[in-house]
Image (cartoon, rainbow, N blue to C red):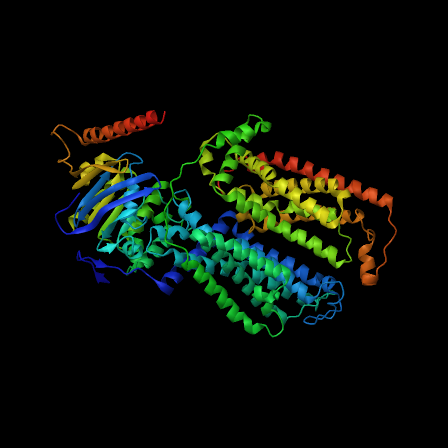
Amino acid sequence: MQSSKAGTNLNEPLTGWSAFSTTFKVMFIEEFRENLDFAKKRRILLFPLLVALVTMVATIGLQFLVGEGASQGADSISDAKTFSWDEMRLALHFPLLLFSLGMGSFAFLGRERILARTGTKNYLLASPALQPLTNPTAHFAYYMKDLSYYVLLILTPVISGMFVGITLEYFTDVSTPLEYSSLPITWIAMIVTLAQGLAFSFIASSMWLLGGWFSRITPVIVVIIGTILGLGLIDREFILWGLATQQPEGLALALPALLASIFIAWCASQLVRDDFEIKVTSKKEIFLPAYNRLKFLGKGPLRLLVAKEAVDLIRSGSLKKMIVSYSVPLVVLLMMAWLVDFAEAPIPINLLSYAPFLGFFGFNFYSWLTALDSPEHMNGLPLSVPQLIRAKVTVYFLATTWISVIFLCLMAWKLDEWAVLPVGLIVMIANSIYIVCLTAFLMGLSPNKAIFDAKIMTWFWIGTVLPLLSLFLLSFTQGDVSFYENWADQVQQEGLQAQAVDFDNERAAAGFKGILWVSVGLVAASVLLMKLLDRKWGRAEFNN
Amino acid sequence: MSGEAESLVVAKDLGKRYGDFIALHPLDVKVSAGEFFGVFGPNGAGKSTFIKLLTGQLRPSIGAVEVLGINAARDPQKLKANIGIVPESESPPSYLTPSEFLQFVGKLRGVDDIDAKVEHWIDWFGLGEKRDTMCKDLSKGQRQKVMLSSAFIHEPKLLFLDEPFANLDPIYQRKCREWLMDMVDNGGTIFLCSHVLEMAERMCNRMAIINNGKVLAAGTVSGLKESEKETLEDVFIRLVGHSIEEAERLSDESSSEEE
């Protein structure tokens, strides 16, 4: 304590480690409570179990991906056109990096929470506005909290699932090329990737928020890094530190890489300014123009709500971010299509195989839409939750369909499969509608919380995997493919020496009909799900 | 606006603007130890902006603020560690219980014997049964009690209150009022923003009336009245009414010039 000029004893605010640890602990409690609040206790505990179960199945299935004879660590079959261990490692770390990049823009999140702190919900990340805590300390604590949370709730169950998968070898007939000794290394390497992705995303968002030339240089840096990586100018391991950690003799890199990630996150947190200003801005009227353009939606509440959602989307500045975020997985899919085509993989994949997956990414977009604004003010209006959900589904469809169409056309061009494009469009649109309707039906206005609810996620997986898988398999009967029949048996028996079989027009016609019927079924299911919204969410409160 | 004793709050030429919009015209203010100072004005007058500038939540566009000898713009953390703030409409973190939130803010401020103080304020505000309820599940009044507790827990000598009794029932309004009066009697200082004029009559030593970001008048409550018969409501309407008429006149003039 020290004395002020007014003779009052002054407190020194908590700083450094003490402020960080105090904030970290309560933030961890806050995160757990927020997830628990949505999913029941039993279900949130089931989520890691579900992750472990899926990983266990994947561990057993690993032998089919890398070949039964492949021993771990050696790329004995890497020259064959099956997956090598290096590719498998990349397949583990690259999506994890994408996931963590998507989750780590904490500077944006902090700004949003500070701006929304006078609303009905408030979070610790906004507490520096009132409490003797700096924004950098709060943001760094948030980074560490998120990192710990994901390690506990996702990465550790993944490793546990692998452990169970290997253990099953001793009790059943199944086998896996994975070894116990690799699990600690995999766990550590995944933590490195997660920490790195969160840190990179965090610092990009912090730099962006600094404004001025920082905002301009950030996307340039991102594009440069992406180009360097894409063109293979430097080894992937330089960018993907977790992947480098998992290489032979790479374990020594784990600690420096983890510390470097945490240091980057600390730097990112130092760039977050103690700015609690809520800028007062006047905007040109856009609600009525938007409403007038939506005449095709009739005169009911749907048109009003869609216009309101469109205004939210534009005014929040999220439209660009969401379109980019929606496009990124589609770019990955496009690259995948090109790679599979390039590598002449022994799988008869064609344009119709990708079309269902283009629609799958609607889940992300819908999640963003539900997080734009708190809907609680609607509790006093003559509206129902199903009406708002339908409006969000409509906005999703209007805002994203054109992007998917462009990507499908690009794929058709890349694969030179223009003939199946019309059917591809039908499949893509049917899937796109269905996935979002299913998400909306199961998760209502809170999909971000629902991902930790095991019961909901189980239904979601069943609801998505079955139609996706059937369309994927049926797609093998179409396009410019030779392997359309018992291809799995042939590949298993003959490997790359598998012979093409004659093209059977009857089978192709049947497959074509099957694809169309599944698509029609998905559209019908979507309509049914939208009808059932009233039963499931009719009495729910507006709350996200 | 100046006090005679040693000043705890000193703002010089303090102003805030957002682009062309002036949220607070430059003003000087001094609040002395032991004063109950009130700022009153209609909705959107600039009261909350004023309090946020004084407490380091906003950076001034011009001028400077010193509170307890601390520069509010330069060292807001130190300032926030030594004052209590009750904002107009902010809630405690939704997913913490009242007890957890008070522990958190107490620790940030380095409060000694924190458990006892948390217990004291939870009991004082009658939140005992809600101790383990998440703040999001509390009523508005209960959330306001948690926010008041968080401002009182470190026993600051200076409090900044923005509509502090909103959503409180009459029993707790009276209880808080009496506690605040005791605090001032014991040398504490309070800076209050409100549009409830009754609070000025009952509690304030000095007050200012602001509208459209400008101070219209400042002084003691009795000093602002033109006659003994005039009520504070009359004073308010006289000053603010003119201010609104003037603003409307200026707006009309500028729009006719544009035409």
Percent coordinates x, y for residue B85 in the rendering? 29, 48
- Quadrant holding the C terminus of chain B: top left
Percent coordinates x, y for residue B164 in the rendering? 28, 42
At 62% from the left and 64% from the top, the residue drawn is A233
State the residue in front, A239 or A380: A239
Q: Is residue A529 left or right of residue A191?
A: right
State whether residue A202 is above or below residue A388: below
Q: Quadrant of residue A232?
A: bottom right
Percent coordinates x, y for residue B223 in the rendering? 13, 36
State whether residue A477 is above or below residue A291: below
The answer to whether residue A463 is seen in the rendering is no
State the residue in front, A305 or A388: A305
At 72% from the left and 37% from the top, the residue drawn is A520
At 67% from the left and 40% from the top, the residue drawn is A429
Percent coordinates x, y for residue A425 in the rendering? 70, 41
- Quadrant holding the N terminus of chain B: top left
State whether residue A285 is above or below residue A100: above
State whether residue A73 is above or below residue A42: below
The answer to whether residue A350 is seen in the rendering is yes
Q: Is residue B204 left or right of residue A215?
A: left
